[in-house]
Image (cartoon, coloured by chain):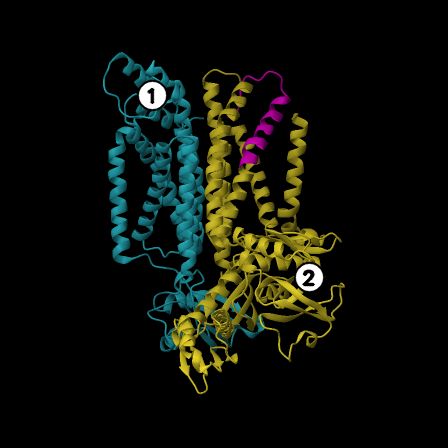
Chain colours: A yellow, B cyan
């Protein structure tokens, strides 16, 4: 690459990152009106600096109990069918009980034996005429409720803080512990945030037995859903049409949201927004079997109990699929996020919504920002004093680093907190390491009697390998932190990776180009100010 | 300008002293943590949230000061926020757990908060609500943080083994663990509460320490090619001396920024900056004295491969088991 192209590259990068990272902050400060594309992504200030919105939700833990009861009941029903025990009726009167009626006296012993399988979670009591009532044990109820809240909390955390850079504050609240307090920093679109938090997000893929039909009744056999089947509503497929149609589906899902590995926005063959998903290995194998056996039939994509679409299965599908329907671009993005974060174990209701002020007083904020500026100035002045003119090079590289970092952080939707700003300063303090390494090496080469140009080239060349090693090691550790950490730990990994990439670019490419630029104007150079 | 020019300090001579000093600090730290424990900030411990409506406008700062002065156990860790529309003059206060949190002590805590506000002379107020609130940083996050750190160290171990050798990798990872241990010890000595900011600082230290170590190892690797007849200890010493200027300058600039945060950053950044100060010093020290010493112990202080091979060819003295390149093995066989 010639010097001209290097300079052009640098200017392009600088302008792009300034537009995303620096311009919106300055524009907002001076009240300049700017295109929404730029302003939407600007770095937001955290709860500690600016406050945000305060939400309290109640987890409907009864949902989790009902689900457990229904699943246990279905398991028992399946077990009874395979053993040939015919009972009159099985029902769930409420969320913690289910009732089996009409167990034939001849099969009573066999029934009791089969029912023993559920006794870990349910107590059994016998009634008249072969009726049995199963009630969930109190300790199981307590632990299921607790689990549901903890799971809901984790799911919410994943939804509002996927990359770990959003800095929310999430806690359980209340004497029963079934409330969740969520504080989000400076959310402008509160409704969208609330919708994302609350969506159940349960995805199921089920084989269509019959349908669609205009009414639910069309599928009923003797006024009941056929055994092992269920009837679910869905849209007729025409975009924007609210009219519901109904499908008769197999009750057992081929795969569900638990088998998802990833989901992301895409566009279908009609240029409509859609969500493409990838299943994990296990889910992919099961999905392959089911789709392979059902070629030519339709597959219903069910989201929160509603059929989104029911495309025909044209061939065996294993790990990759797509959810189409009449979605808008924003719905598709929200849906991808919700699917990635997993389903909520129970539904949620909002109890409270308020705006809250910053957690830090004006004095603390001023002190923190002042200290950060002092730190940055100290680092810069040291570099200028110690490396003289070459120090200017390092300071320019540092400025670049800061701008790229701000731009990338704004792009991933990061939120700036006071410790975050302090971390930035520290990144700068440590980031000069690469410059120091190179400059010290250049000095060594100069001392060894090499010419200026040769020394600069040798310095950059020799240190490059070291930099690759240190940066790769750090990126590896960031990857592990991101993969296995949650919330702020992930956020740390994201910030670290962004800093490393920015640093490698500025300390090698930008800094080297600056040297070349300075030397290109002069012919023979005898001394270097370093 | 040069801080160090052509130095030739024998750093490895001090390795036993260094190891003894580090062990002493970490044992003392371990004992302190064992007996006193590390206090957990409100993020980890949970507590009570109280909402008060004031009759006169108050600032968040005033409320925090009143709590700091009069709330039992201090209000330094309290989270105070304006709540709802500013014209309603409502303030939400989250205070850490004091003793067991039950229905009864909930009202006790709320009462204590109100006593502090009253003594702080902030005018009249009405309680709008009080609730028990859990930790914002759950136990699962803490566990995952520890696991993620351990696994990331394993990742670094694998990478350095691949790029250098297992002995170098072990040195780097032990040095990193050393830095975390020393920093935690100092946090315990000075009684800092564990907060998310401090965890971030610890992770930063781990990264810094590895970085610092790799830079020196890289120089050792480079020198090994040119200094085949010198002992490994000499090669390491030369590498440390060659990079000494850089080590001091980098540590210095990072320390400058951490010191500025510590001195001027106020209460919020105090723990964060303290952790960084200790960690940066420990990280620099461990690179020079601990990481290199481990490589030296592992590989033996004798001549490097080529030097030893020359020796072995001259005499039939028993050789220490070391890894040899295929070429060398072939040479020996012939």
* Front residue (pair B275, A149): A149
* Front residue (pair A296, A368): A296
| Start-end of magenta stretch | A504-530
**Residue A161 in sight in this render:** no
Image position, residue B171 (x, y; %): 34, 35
Residue farthest to the front? A106
Image position, residue A296 (x, y; %): 69, 57
Image position, residue A319 (x, y; %): 59, 51
Rendered residue at 48%/49% (across/down): A483
In the rendered image, residues at marks 1 and 2 fall on the same chain? no
**Label 1 – label 2 distance at C-alpha:** 69 Å
* Front residue (pair A181, A376): A181
**In the image, which is nearer the foreground, mark 1 or mark 2?**
2
Residue A367 sits above or below residue B244 on the image: below
Q: Mark 1 points at which residue?
A: B305
Q: Mark 2 points at which residue?
A: A310
**Residue A380 in sight in this render:** yes
Instruction: Check residue A508 for magenta coloring.
Output: yes
**Do residues under tags 1 and 2 come within 8 Å of each other at their CB atoms?**
no
Name the side, left or right, on which A30 lies relative to B176: right
């Amino acid at each position: 690459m010639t010097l001209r192209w290097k300079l052009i590259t640098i200017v392009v990068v600088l302008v792009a990152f300034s537009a995303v990272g620096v311009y919106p902050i300055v524009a907002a400060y001076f009240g300049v009106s700017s295109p929404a594309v730029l302003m939407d992504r600007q770095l937001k200030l955290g709860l500690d600096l600016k406050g945000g919105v305060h939400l309290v939700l109640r987890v409907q833990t009864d949902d989790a109990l009902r689900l457990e009861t229904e699943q246990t009941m279905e398991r028992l029903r399946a077990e009874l069918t395979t053993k040939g025990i015919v009972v009159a009726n099985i029902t769930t009167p409420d969320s913690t009980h289910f009732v089996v009626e009409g167990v034939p006296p001849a099969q009573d012993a066999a029934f009791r034996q089969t029912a023993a399988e559920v006794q870990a979670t349910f107590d059994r009591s016998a009634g008249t005429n072969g009726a049995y009532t199963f009630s969930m044990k109190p300790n199981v109820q307590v632990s299921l409720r607790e689990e549901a809240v903890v799971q809901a909390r984790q799911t919410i955390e994943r939804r509002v803080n996927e990359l770990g850079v959003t800095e929310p504050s999430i806690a359980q609240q209340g004497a029963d512990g079934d409330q969740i307090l969520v504080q989000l920093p400076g959310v402008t679109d509160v409704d969208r945030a609330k919708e994302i938090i609350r969506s159940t997000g349960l995805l199921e893929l089920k084989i269509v037995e019959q349908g669609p039909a205009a009414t639910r009744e069309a599928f009923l056999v003797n006024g009941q859903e056929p055994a092992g089947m269920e009837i679910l509503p869905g849209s007729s497929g025409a975009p924007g049409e609210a009219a519901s149609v109904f499908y008769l589906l197999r009750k057992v899902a081929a795969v569900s949201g638990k088998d998802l590995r990833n989901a992301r926005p895409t566009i279908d063959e009609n240029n409509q927004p859609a969500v493409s998903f990838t299943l994990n290995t296990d889910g992919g194998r099961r999905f392959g079997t089911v789709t392979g056996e059902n070629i030519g039939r339709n597959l219903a994509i069910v989201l929160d109990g509603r059929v989104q679409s029911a495309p025909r299965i044209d061939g065996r599908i294993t790990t990759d699929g797509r959810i189409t329907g009449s979605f808008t671009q924003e719905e598709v993005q929200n849906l991808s996020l919700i699917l990635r974060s997993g389903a909520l174990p129970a539904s949620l209701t909002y109890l409270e919504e308020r705006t809250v002020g910053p957690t830090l007083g004006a004095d603390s904020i001023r002190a923190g920002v002042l200290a950060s500026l002092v730190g940055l100035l100290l680092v810069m002045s040291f570099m200028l004093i110690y490396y003289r003119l070459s120090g200017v090079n390092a300071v320019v590289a540092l400025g670049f680093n800061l701008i790229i970092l701000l731009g990338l952080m704004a792009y991933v939707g990061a939120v700036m907190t006071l410790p975050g700003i302090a971390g930035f300063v520290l990144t700068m303090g440590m980031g000069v390491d690469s410059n120091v390494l190179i400059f010290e090496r250049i000095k060594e080469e100069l001392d060894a009697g090499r010419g200026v140009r040769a020394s600069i080239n040798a310095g950059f060349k020799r240190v490059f390998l070291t930099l690759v090693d240190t940066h790769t090691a750090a990126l590896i550790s960031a990857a592990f932190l991101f993969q296995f950490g949650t919330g702020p730990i992930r956020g740390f990994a994201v910030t670290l990776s962004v800093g490393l990439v920015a640093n490698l670019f500025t300390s090698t490419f930008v800094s080297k180009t600056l040297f070349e630029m300075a030397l290109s104007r002069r012919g023979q150079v005898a001394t270097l100010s370093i | 300008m040069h801080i160090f020019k052509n130095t030739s300090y024998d750093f490895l001579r001090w390795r036993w002293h260094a190891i003894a000093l580090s062990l002493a600090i970490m044992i003392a730290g371990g004992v302190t943590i064992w007996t006193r424990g590390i206090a957990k900030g409100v993020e980890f411990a949970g507590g009570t949230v109280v909402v008060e409506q004031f009759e006169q406008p108050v600032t968040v700062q005033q409320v925090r000061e009143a709590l700091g002065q009069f709330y039992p156990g201090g209000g330094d860790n309290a989270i105070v926020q304006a709540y709802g529309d500013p014209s309603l003059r409502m303030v939400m206060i989250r205070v850490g757990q004091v003793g067991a949190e039950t229905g009864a002590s909930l009202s006790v805590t709320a009462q204590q908060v109100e006593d502090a506000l009253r003594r702080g002379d902030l005018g009249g107020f009405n309680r709008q609500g009080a609730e028990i609130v859990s930790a914002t940083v759950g136990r699962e996050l803490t566990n995952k943080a520890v696991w993620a750190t351990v696994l990331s160290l394993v990742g670094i171990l694998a990478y350095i083994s691949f790029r250098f050798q297992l002995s170098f990798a072990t040195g780097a990872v032990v040095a990193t663990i050393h830095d975390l241990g020393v920093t935690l010890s100092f946090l315990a000595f000075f009684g800092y509460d564990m907060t998310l900011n401090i965890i971030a600082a610890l992770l930063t230290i781990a990264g810094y320490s590895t970085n610092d170590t790799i830079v020196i190892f890289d120089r050792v690797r480079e020198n090994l090619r040119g200094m085949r007849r010198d002992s490994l200890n000499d090669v390491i010493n030369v590498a440390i001396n060659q990079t000494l200027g850089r080590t001091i300058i980098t540590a210095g600039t990072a320390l400058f920024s951490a010191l500025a945060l510590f001195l001027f950053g106020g209460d919020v950044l105090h723990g964060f900056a303290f952790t960084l100060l200790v960690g940066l010093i420990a990280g620099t020290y461990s690179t020079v004295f601990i990481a290199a010493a481990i490589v030296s112990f592992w590989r033996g202080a004798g001549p490097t491969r080529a030097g030893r091979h020359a020796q072995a060819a001259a005499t039939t003295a028993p050789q220490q088991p070391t890894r040899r390149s295929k070429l060398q093995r072939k040479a020996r066989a012939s």
